[in-house]
Amino acid sequence: MTPDLEKNYCSLQEQIRLSAQKAGRNPDSVRLLAVSKKMDSEKLRVLWQLGQRLFGENRVQEARVKIPEMPAGGEWHFIGGLQTNKAKDAVEYFDVIESVDRIDLANELEKRAAAVGKKLKIMLEVNVGGEAAKHGCDPQKAGELLQAVLPLARLEVVGLMAIPPFREDPEMARPFFLKLREIRDRLQDSGGVVLPELSMGMSHDFPVAIAEGATLVRIGTALFGPRSA
Ligand SMILES: *Cc1c(COP(=O)(O)O)cnc(C)c1O
């Protein structure tokens, strides 16, 4: 398993660089978020030794066991749906919450961050495919959410995140990546803010996401292999 993990990691980093170059972008402008959900800390330490510091988790309960088992100095991103009653733990364990999709959650994160004297980076998750079963705010409401979040002193909005509808052919996901970038550009123009990060692209479609401007690709399966259910 370990030799594979090392091989996958190096090959992925190479593919990310090539995709960026092909798109005429600086390869350093795209970072790999290792989606480590359901993987134990032993595997994560292999990546850590290879230099990986950016990890993504989607469940607070799992992360509060795993994160303390890892060396300090990593950057932990929360990428799952977040219930308001888990905000306290999320603030304690994570550096970036990528899945902020509603005002009450932002307010709760602000309150919890203030209580522990922490500043928290967040991203706004946008439901670019308009899927009923998915998290993320309605693209039409993203401006409203941004305006509600900007005054919150403990939260720094650094960009947008999306999980587009699954398409067998990654090219078919391109319009959704483009859409997230356009929403970002519109929010920047109208909101007078800079939103540098676009978290989009997963194992099967990250090269397309990079072509459309992803700065953060969230990759699990292509790195660790399939997750057991
Ligand atoms: C699991 C997950 C990923 C990684 O998906 P893979 O297809 O395994 O690369 C990315 N983003 C989110 C939000 C996830 O939950």
Image: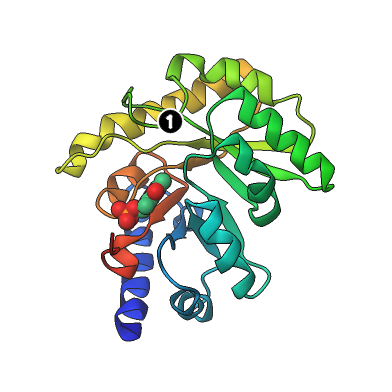
Residue with the most extreme left position: 169
Q: Secondary structure at mark 1?
A: helix
Left or right of residue 27, residue 71 in this image? right
Which image quadrant: the N terminus? Answer: bottom left
Tell me where residue 18 appears, x and y as whole percent: 32, 60
Residue with the most extreme bottom position: 3
- How many residues crowd mark 1 within 10 Å: few (<14), some (14–19), many (20+)? many
Q: Specify the quadrant of the image occupied by residue 114.
A: top right
The answer to whether residue 19 is seen in the rendering is no
The answer to whether residue 183 is seen in the rendering is yes
Where is 176 relative to 48, above or below? above
Amino acid type indicated by mark 1: Arg
Which image quadrant: the C terminus? Answer: bottom left
Left or right of residue 226, residue 106 in this image? right
Tell me where residue 220 appears, x and y as whole percent: 36, 60
Where is 94 relative to 49, above or below? above
Where is 129 relative to 81, above or below? above
Left or right of residue 25, residue 64 in this image? right
Can you identify the residue that label 1 sits on? 181
Whether label 1 lies within 8 Å of ligand 1 gets the answer no
What residue do we see at 37% from left, 72% from top?
9
What residue do we see at 24% from left, 52% from top?
204
What residue do we see at 34% from left, 77% from top?
5
- What colouring style does the render use? rainbow
Left or right of residue 61, residue 94 in this image? right
